[in-house]
Amino acid sequence: MVARGPELRGGGLRGGAGSLWVVMHLQQQAGQAASAQTQAFASSVARTLAGQFEHAVNHGAPLKQIPRVEVYLAKIQRSTPGVSQITLKDEQGNTLAAAQNSAVESNAVASVAIERAGQTVGSVSVQVANTAVGQQQTAVLWLLPVAVLSFAALTAGVVGWGLARNT
């Protein structure tokens, strides 16, 4: 029985290291999923806004002359959680209007062309921070190691108790 004690402890160390690797791998995958989700959200907002500006341009309104664009972008930016900046640019890349919240860190940027009769007349760029779901995933990521380490400590305690009892 005594000869098995070191073997069990070595196995416990390997098991703990394996568990830690699994947790770190899961964290990495979840982080990548959150980044992809944030990028998809930025692209969705940019496509929606570009479509609205295309509609106006295709009905004869020059992009540079659409009234109250800055106010409209500011309203969208404030009312859409996670959006840190929206920029409307002309075909040369000059900023026509922008709305931003510098207190929000940007993690993803998406830019979509605004077209009229097959020609690019401008673009909309949207910068987005972590989405609410991405933030929830990040919070869950820190619970995983705590749960695994707690389980490992419990397992080590049970194995140690069993070894002490058998010797």
Image: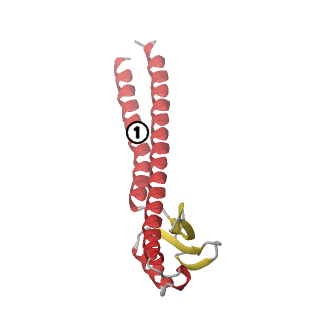
Determine the secondary structure under disc 1. Answer: helix
Q: Quadrant of the N terminus?
A: top left
Using the image, determine if residue 91 lies above or below residue 146. below
Question: Closest to the observer: 152 or 60?
Answer: 60
The residue sitting at the front extreme is 117
Write down the residue under mark 1: 148
Query: Residue 56 lies in what quarter of the image?
Result: bottom left
Say which residue appears at 47% left-offset and 81% top-offset.
60
Say which residue appears at 61% left-offset and 72% top-offset.
91
Can residue 83 be seen here?
A: yes
Using the image, determine if residue 164 lies above or below residue 139. above
Can residue 126 be seen here?
A: no
Query: Residue 97 lies in what quarter of the image?
Result: bottom right
Identity of the amino acid at label 1? Val
Question: Closest to the observer: 52 or 167?
Answer: 52
The residue sitting at the bottom extreme is 67
Q: Give percent across and percent down for residue 2.
A: 43, 13
Q: Give percent across and percent down for residue 66.
A: 49, 84
Question: Residue 148 vs residue 127: left or right?
Answer: left
Q: Quadrant of the C terminus?
A: top left
> How is the model colour-coded?
secondary structure
Question: Closest to the observer: 63 or 59?
Answer: 59
